[in-house]
Image: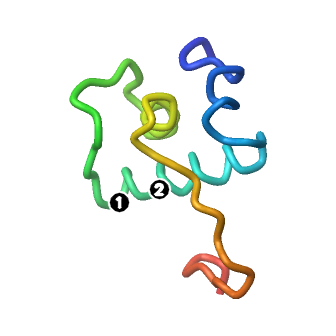
Amino acid sequence: MLYPSVDHLKTKIDSKYSLVSVASKRARQLQEDGGERLTSYVSHKQVGKALEEIAAGALINLSPGKNIIYKDEV
């Protein structure tokens, strides 16, 4: 992966695990619903678009509470 670099993404989100989690959930959301937040993207794939949104600051990682259960975890 050339753009955005992992080092740049780690300045936005604290850990690689959180980065993968946020990017995968956003990629799924892009695939199902669309709703792109940037005007132009370098990547054509949803995961690349999600990572570009994180790098641009359009996505932030909010710390979820301990009792939150996501729809795909049930």
Q: Closer to the camera, 59 or 4?
A: 59
Residue 31 vertical position relative to residue 64 in the rendered view, above or below: above
Q: Secondary structure at mark 2?
A: helix
Q: Closer to the camera, 39 or 71?
A: 39
Q: Residues within 10 Å of mark 2 (few under 14, many from 20)?
A: some
Q: Secondary structure at mark 1?
A: helix
Q: Position of residue 8 (x, y in %)?
A: 63, 21
Q: Residue at x 41, y 23 (%)?
A: 43
Image quadrant occupied by the C terminus: bottom right
Alpha carbons under labels 2 and 1: distance apart: 6 Å
Residue 64 vertical position relative to residue 49 in the rendered view, above or below: below
Q: Amino acid at mark 1?
A: Glu
Q: Position of residue 49 (x, y in %)?
A: 42, 34
Q: Residue at x 58, y 60 (%)?
A: 62
Horizontal side of residue 35 vs 18, given as left or right: left
Q: Are marks 2 and 1 in contact (CB under 8 Å)?
A: yes
Q: Residue at x 51, y 38 (%)?
A: 47
Q: Amino acid at mark 2?
A: Arg
The extreme top residue here reads 2
Q: Position of residue 26 (x, y in %)?
A: 48, 52
On the image, numbered disc 1 is attached to which residue?
Answer: 32
